[in-house]
Amino acid sequence: MIPMKFERPPELAEIHEEIEQIIQAREWLMPRLKEEAEKLRKLGFGVDDECRIKPGEFKNLFGEENVARDLEWIKGKKTKFEKETPEKIKGEVLEMAKTLTFNNFWFDKRLIALRTSEYDDVANGVDQLIFDAETKTALAAVDATTNWKDKTKEISSGIENGSKVKYGFGFENESLVKKSYYNLPLFIISMKGEELLEVLKDIEKGEISFEGRKVENTVLNELKSQSENFAESASLKLKLSYEKAGEIFERL
Protein backbone atom coordinates (compact mmCIF):
# COMPACT_ATOMS: atom_id res chain seq x y z
CA MET A 1 0.00 0.00 0.00
CA ILE A 2 1.16 3.56 -0.68
CA PRO A 3 1.10 5.60 2.55
CA MET A 4 -1.09 8.68 2.06
CA LYS A 5 -0.28 11.86 3.97
CA PHE A 6 -2.02 15.16 3.49
CA GLU A 7 0.04 17.48 5.68
CA ARG A 8 2.40 19.91 3.94
CA PRO A 9 5.94 19.12 5.15
CA PRO A 10 9.03 21.11 4.14
CA GLU A 11 10.26 20.62 0.58
CA LEU A 12 13.15 18.27 1.46
CA ALA A 13 10.83 16.13 3.57
CA GLU A 14 8.42 15.94 0.62
CA ILE A 15 11.19 14.74 -1.69
CA HIS A 16 12.24 12.11 0.85
CA GLU A 17 8.64 10.91 1.30
CA GLU A 18 8.15 10.70 -2.46
CA ILE A 19 11.24 8.53 -2.85
CA GLU A 20 10.17 6.30 0.07
CA GLN A 21 6.74 5.75 -1.49
CA ILE A 22 8.30 4.85 -4.82
CA ILE A 23 10.74 2.42 -3.18
CA GLN A 24 7.90 0.75 -1.27
CA ALA A 25 5.90 0.47 -4.48
CA ARG A 26 8.46 -1.89 -5.98
CA GLU A 27 7.46 -4.59 -3.48
CA TRP A 28 3.73 -4.56 -4.16
CA LEU A 29 4.24 -4.16 -7.91
CA MET A 30 6.07 -7.49 -8.17
CA PRO A 31 3.01 -9.79 -7.82
CA ARG A 32 1.11 -7.59 -10.28
CA LEU A 33 3.96 -7.92 -12.77
CA LYS A 34 3.88 -11.68 -12.30
CA GLU A 35 0.17 -11.74 -13.17
CA GLU A 36 0.86 -9.60 -16.24
CA ALA A 37 3.70 -11.92 -17.27
CA GLU A 38 1.30 -14.86 -17.23
CA LYS A 39 -1.00 -13.02 -19.62
CA LEU A 40 1.89 -12.14 -21.93
CA ARG A 41 3.11 -15.74 -21.98
CA LYS A 42 -0.36 -16.89 -23.01
CA LEU A 43 -0.01 -14.57 -26.01
CA GLY A 44 3.26 -16.28 -26.90
CA PHE A 45 5.78 -13.79 -25.52
CA GLY A 46 8.73 -15.41 -23.74
CA VAL A 47 9.05 -13.26 -20.63
CA ASP A 48 10.05 -13.83 -17.03
CA ASP A 49 7.93 -12.98 -13.98
CA GLU A 50 9.01 -9.32 -14.23
CA CYS A 51 7.76 -9.10 -17.83
CA ARG A 52 11.33 -9.02 -19.17
CA ILE A 53 12.09 -10.82 -22.42
CA LYS A 54 14.11 -13.97 -21.67
CA PRO A 55 17.27 -14.50 -23.79
CA GLY A 56 17.07 -18.20 -22.95
CA GLU A 57 14.04 -18.41 -25.25
CA PHE A 58 16.27 -17.48 -28.22
CA LYS A 59 18.80 -20.33 -28.18
CA ASN A 60 17.39 -21.80 -31.38
CA LEU A 61 17.79 -18.43 -33.09
CA PHE A 62 21.25 -17.37 -31.88
CA GLY A 63 22.77 -20.58 -30.57
CA GLU A 64 23.31 -21.65 -26.99
CA GLU A 65 26.88 -20.33 -26.74
CA ASN A 66 25.95 -16.89 -28.07
CA VAL A 67 23.12 -16.51 -25.58
CA ALA A 68 25.34 -17.82 -22.75
CA ARG A 69 27.95 -15.16 -23.54
CA ASP A 70 25.34 -12.41 -23.37
CA LEU A 71 24.02 -13.73 -20.06
CA GLU A 72 27.54 -13.88 -18.65
CA TRP A 73 28.24 -10.36 -19.89
CA ILE A 74 25.17 -8.92 -18.20
CA LYS A 75 25.98 -10.85 -15.04
CA GLY A 76 29.34 -9.09 -14.93
CA LYS A 77 27.71 -5.73 -15.51
CA LYS A 78 25.24 -6.32 -12.70
CA THR A 79 28.08 -7.24 -10.32
CA LYS A 80 29.98 -4.08 -11.26
CA PHE A 81 26.99 -1.78 -10.88
CA GLU A 82 25.01 -3.73 -8.28
CA LYS A 83 24.78 -0.83 -5.82
CA GLU A 84 21.21 0.44 -5.74
CA THR A 85 20.42 4.12 -5.48
CA PRO A 86 17.06 5.83 -5.02
CA GLU A 87 17.22 7.09 -8.61
CA LYS A 88 17.98 3.61 -9.95
CA ILE A 89 15.02 2.17 -8.04
CA LYS A 90 12.83 5.02 -9.28
CA GLY A 91 13.77 4.16 -12.85
CA GLU A 92 12.96 0.49 -12.28
CA VAL A 93 9.59 1.30 -10.73
CA LEU A 94 8.82 3.55 -13.69
CA GLU A 95 9.57 0.66 -16.08
CA MET A 96 7.28 -1.61 -14.10
CA ALA A 97 4.50 0.97 -13.91
CA LYS A 98 4.72 1.77 -17.63
CA THR A 99 4.34 -1.89 -18.52
CA LEU A 100 1.24 -2.33 -16.36
CA THR A 101 -0.44 0.92 -17.39
CA PHE A 102 0.20 0.47 -21.11
CA ASN A 103 -1.22 -3.05 -21.06
CA ASN A 104 -4.16 -2.51 -18.74
CA PHE A 105 -5.23 1.13 -18.45
CA TRP A 106 -3.96 3.52 -21.10
CA PHE A 107 -4.74 4.07 -24.79
CA ASP A 108 -7.79 1.78 -24.74
CA LYS A 109 -5.37 -1.14 -24.25
CA ARG A 110 -4.30 -0.84 -27.87
CA LEU A 111 -0.58 -0.96 -27.06
CA ILE A 112 1.29 -3.99 -25.71
CA ALA A 113 4.41 -3.32 -23.66
CA LEU A 114 7.20 -5.76 -22.81
CA ARG A 115 10.28 -5.01 -20.79
CA THR A 116 13.39 -5.79 -22.83
CA SER A 117 15.97 -8.28 -21.63
CA GLU A 118 18.57 -6.98 -19.21
CA TYR A 119 21.07 -7.39 -22.05
CA ASP A 120 19.20 -4.97 -24.34
CA ASP A 121 18.46 -2.63 -21.46
CA VAL A 122 22.18 -2.22 -20.73
CA ALA A 123 23.83 -2.88 -24.10
CA ASN A 124 21.35 -1.06 -26.32
CA GLY A 125 19.67 1.42 -23.98
CA VAL A 126 16.13 0.20 -24.70
CA ASP A 127 14.01 -0.74 -21.71
CA GLN A 128 10.70 -1.49 -23.42
CA LEU A 129 9.43 -2.95 -26.65
CA ILE A 130 5.98 -1.62 -27.41
CA PHE A 131 3.60 -2.97 -30.06
CA ASP A 132 0.50 -1.51 -31.61
CA ALA A 133 -1.86 -4.48 -31.38
CA GLU A 134 -3.92 -3.32 -34.36
CA THR A 135 -1.20 -2.68 -36.97
CA LYS A 136 1.37 -5.06 -35.39
CA THR A 137 3.95 -2.24 -35.52
CA ALA A 138 6.83 -2.38 -33.04
CA LEU A 139 8.03 0.78 -31.26
CA ALA A 140 11.03 1.11 -28.98
CA ALA A 141 10.78 3.27 -25.87
CA VAL A 142 13.54 4.20 -23.44
CA ASP A 143 13.09 5.78 -20.03
CA ALA A 144 15.41 8.75 -19.68
CA THR A 145 13.85 10.24 -16.56
CA THR A 146 16.47 9.44 -13.97
CA ASN A 147 19.67 9.97 -15.93
CA TRP A 148 18.88 12.03 -19.01
CA LYS A 149 22.30 13.74 -18.97
CA ASP A 150 24.14 10.41 -18.85
CA LYS A 151 22.15 9.09 -21.82
CA THR A 152 22.21 12.17 -24.06
CA LYS A 153 24.76 10.71 -26.50
CA GLU A 154 23.09 7.32 -26.93
CA ILE A 155 19.64 8.89 -27.15
CA SER A 156 20.82 11.23 -29.92
CA SER A 157 22.31 8.27 -31.78
CA GLY A 158 19.11 6.26 -31.36
CA ILE A 159 17.02 9.11 -32.74
CA GLU A 160 19.28 9.57 -35.76
CA ASN A 161 20.12 5.96 -36.55
CA GLY A 162 17.46 3.89 -34.80
CA SER A 163 17.65 1.73 -31.72
CA LYS A 164 18.69 -1.91 -31.51
CA VAL A 165 17.02 -4.82 -29.75
CA LYS A 166 18.75 -8.19 -30.03
CA TYR A 167 16.16 -10.22 -28.15
CA GLY A 168 12.84 -9.09 -29.51
CA PHE A 169 9.51 -10.22 -30.85
CA GLY A 170 7.60 -9.16 -33.91
CA PHE A 171 4.71 -10.10 -36.14
CA GLU A 172 5.10 -11.67 -39.57
CA ASN A 173 1.99 -12.71 -41.49
CA GLU A 174 -0.03 -12.22 -38.30
CA SER A 175 2.19 -14.71 -36.44
CA LEU A 176 4.37 -13.84 -33.46
CA VAL A 177 8.06 -14.54 -34.13
CA LYS A 178 11.38 -14.02 -32.36
CA LYS A 179 13.50 -11.41 -34.09
CA SER A 180 16.14 -8.69 -33.69
CA TYR A 181 15.72 -5.03 -34.56
CA TYR A 182 18.43 -2.70 -35.84
CA ASN A 183 16.64 0.53 -36.67
CA LEU A 184 13.56 0.88 -34.52
CA PRO A 185 12.26 4.40 -33.94
CA LEU A 186 13.18 5.56 -30.46
CA PHE A 187 10.73 7.27 -28.12
CA ILE A 188 11.42 8.65 -24.66
CA ILE A 189 8.83 8.31 -21.91
CA SER A 190 9.48 10.30 -18.77
CA MET A 191 7.48 11.17 -15.67
CA LYS A 192 7.99 13.51 -12.78
CA GLY A 193 7.94 11.97 -9.32
CA GLU A 194 4.44 13.22 -8.57
CA GLU A 195 3.16 11.88 -11.90
CA LEU A 196 4.64 8.46 -11.17
CA LEU A 197 2.92 8.44 -7.79
CA GLU A 198 -0.44 9.15 -9.46
CA VAL A 199 0.13 6.22 -11.83
CA LEU A 200 1.06 3.95 -8.91
CA LYS A 201 -2.14 4.91 -7.08
CA ASP A 202 -4.18 3.96 -10.15
CA ILE A 203 -2.42 0.60 -10.45
CA GLU A 204 -3.12 -0.08 -6.79
CA LYS A 205 -6.81 0.82 -7.15
CA GLY A 206 -7.17 -0.96 -10.49
CA GLU A 207 -8.69 2.01 -12.29
CA ILE A 208 -7.64 5.35 -13.77
CA SER A 209 -8.35 8.50 -11.81
CA PHE A 210 -8.78 11.99 -13.20
CA GLU A 211 -5.18 12.79 -12.28
CA GLY A 212 -3.99 9.53 -13.81
CA ARG A 213 -5.79 10.37 -17.04
CA LYS A 214 -3.94 13.68 -17.13
CA VAL A 215 -0.62 11.80 -16.92
CA GLU A 216 -1.75 9.53 -19.76
CA ASN A 217 -2.58 12.55 -21.93
CA THR A 218 0.75 14.18 -21.09
CA VAL A 219 2.63 11.05 -22.17
CA LEU A 220 0.56 10.72 -25.36
CA ASN A 221 1.10 14.35 -26.33
CA GLU A 222 4.83 13.92 -25.77
CA LEU A 223 4.89 10.83 -27.99
CA LYS A 224 3.06 12.75 -30.73
CA SER A 225 5.52 15.61 -30.44
CA GLN A 226 8.52 13.26 -30.52
CA SER A 227 7.24 11.44 -33.62
CA GLU A 228 7.23 14.78 -35.45
CA ASN A 229 10.40 16.31 -34.00
CA PHE A 230 12.59 13.20 -34.09
CA ALA A 231 11.69 12.59 -37.74
CA GLU A 232 13.56 15.77 -38.62
CA SER A 233 16.86 14.30 -37.36
CA ALA A 234 16.35 10.74 -38.54
CA SER A 235 17.43 8.94 -41.69
CA LEU A 236 14.89 8.60 -44.50
CA LYS A 237 13.82 5.09 -43.46
CA LEU A 238 13.46 6.13 -39.84
CA LYS A 239 11.64 9.28 -40.86
CA LEU A 240 8.95 7.12 -42.39
CA SER A 241 8.83 4.97 -39.23
CA TYR A 242 8.37 8.03 -37.04
CA GLU A 243 5.62 9.31 -39.32
CA LYS A 244 3.85 5.95 -39.18
CA ALA A 245 4.16 5.91 -35.39
CA GLY A 246 2.80 9.46 -35.27
CA GLU A 247 -0.26 8.32 -37.19
CA ILE A 248 -0.80 5.56 -34.63
CA PHE A 249 -0.48 7.99 -31.71
CA GLU A 250 -2.97 10.37 -33.36
CA ARG A 251 -5.56 7.57 -33.35
CA LEU A 252 -5.12 6.66 -29.68
Image (cartoon, rainbow, N blue to C red):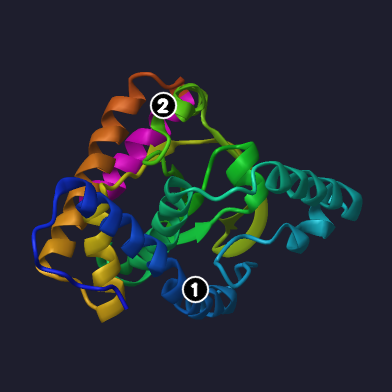
The quadrant in which residue 98 appears is bottom left
Give the labeled residue for mark 2. Answer: 149
Mark 1 belongs to which amino acid? Met
- x 46%, y 72%: residue: 27
Neighbourhood count class around disc 2 (C-alpha, 10 Å): few under 14, some 14–19, many 20 upward: few
Is 245 covered by the magenta stretch?
A: yes
Q: Please identify the quadrant where the C terminus is shown.
A: bottom left
Of pointers 2 and 1, the one earlier in the residue sequence: 1
Q: Say if 233 sits above or below 244 in the image.
A: above
Q: Position of residue 150 (x, y in %)?
A: 47, 28
- In the rendered image, which quarter contains the N terminus? bottom left
Residue 30 is marked as 1
Left or right position of 121 against 105:
right
In the image, residue 121 above or below residue 92: above
Q: Given contact means CB atoms under 8 Å apart, are the residues at marks 2 and 1 in contact?
A: no
Q: Which residue is rendered at x = 82% and y = 51% of the image?
A: 67
Residue drawn at x 21%, y 56% as measured from the top left: 216
Q: Nearer the viewer, residue 18 or 118?
A: 18
Q: Which residues are magenta?
A: 237-251
Tell me residue 179's x, y (percent).
67, 50
Where is residue 39 shown, x and y percent of the image?
51, 78
Disc 2 marks a residue whose amino acid type is Lys
Give the side of residue 33 with respect to residue 101, left or right: right
The residue carrying pointer 1 sits among few (fewer than 14), some (14 to 19) or many (20 or more) residues within 10 Å by Cα, namely some
